[in-house]
């Protein structure tokens, strides 16, 4: 079996999007008692850097086609992106199972920070699309209950918390798709913008 099988750019793009759709987080269509409202699947590892100091962070992600979206709290990754928007991300199927075909993606692209201050409409649209407001309410409910916070005060606290988040939008320039087969062969495909 060859290490690289020929596929068209369109076929590679479709395989990448299918993998992203299968592994990214999504709105939980039937949230139950123990659901925050988001269907969690694989995480990605986001690599940022500044002044030759790399930083890697495991994060939940969402996608629209090839574009990746991540909700990020303030911290080193956000500071790095502000200074250097070039990023890399890695996604792989978990858990590792040699008995079946498994895939991974290595993504190289440019990150853009979207937040309630610089693009409130887009931020709110994406947060609603992926149920982030409902998830925040569900996660904060026990804390607010213990602190005897009114519904109005709780909504204000959640709104303030959402105001600290950034939506990291990654526009890929280059993606490497790897397929690990049960016979231990590896096929590698590349997509470039």
Image: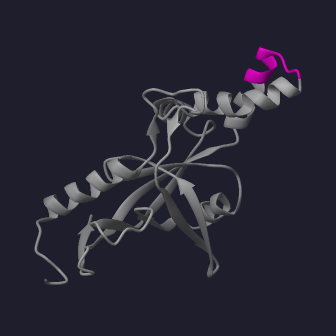
- Prevailing secondary structure class for the magenta stretch in the rendered image: helix
Residues rendered magenta in the picture: 148-155
Give residue 189's position: percent from left, percent from top. Answer: 23, 72
Tell me what residue is drawn at x 13 percent, y 76 percent.
Answer: 5
In percent of the image, x 46 and y 45: which residue is there? 25
Q: Is residue 178 left or right of residue 162?
A: left
Residue nearer the viewer, 185 or 137: 185
Q: Quadrant of the C terminus?
A: bottom left
User: How many numbered tags mark residues here?
Assistant: 0
Place of residue 114 in the rendered image (x, y in percent of width and height, measured from the top left): 55, 44
The quadrant where residue 53 appears: bottom right
Could you tell me residue 187's position as x and y percent? 23, 77
Residue 185 place in picture, x, y as percent: 24, 81
Q: Quadrant of residue 190?
A: bottom left
In this view, the residue in front, 61 or 67, is 61
Taking 128 as reference, is 42 above or below it? below
Tell me which residue sits at (17%, 80%) in the image.
4
Quadrant of the drawing holding the N terminus: bottom left
């Amino acid at each position: 079996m060859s290490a690289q099988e020929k596929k068209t750019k369109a076929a590679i793009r479709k395989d990448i999007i299918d993998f992203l759709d299968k592994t990214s987080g999504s709105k939980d269509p039937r949230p139950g008692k123990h659901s925050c409202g988001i269907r969690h699947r694989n995480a990605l590892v986001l690599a940022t850097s500044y002044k030759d100091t790399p930083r890697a962070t495991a994060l939940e992600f969402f996608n629209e086609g090839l574009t990746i979206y991540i909700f990020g709290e303030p911290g080193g990754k956000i500071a790095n992106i502000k200074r250097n928007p070039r990023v890399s991300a890695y996604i792989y199927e978990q858990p590792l199972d040699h008995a079946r075909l498994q895939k991974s993606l290595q993504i190289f692209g440019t990150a853009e920070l979207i937040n309630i201050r610089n693009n409130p409409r887009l931020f709110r649209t994406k947060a609603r699309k992926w149920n982030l407001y409902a998830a925040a309410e569900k996660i904060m409910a026990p804390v607010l209950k213990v602190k005897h916070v009114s519904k109005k005060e709780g909504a204000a606290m959640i709104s303030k918390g959402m105001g600290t988040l950034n939506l990291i939008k990654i526009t890929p320039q280059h993606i490497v798709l790897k397929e690990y087969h049960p016979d231990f062969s590896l096929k590698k495909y590349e997509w470039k913008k």
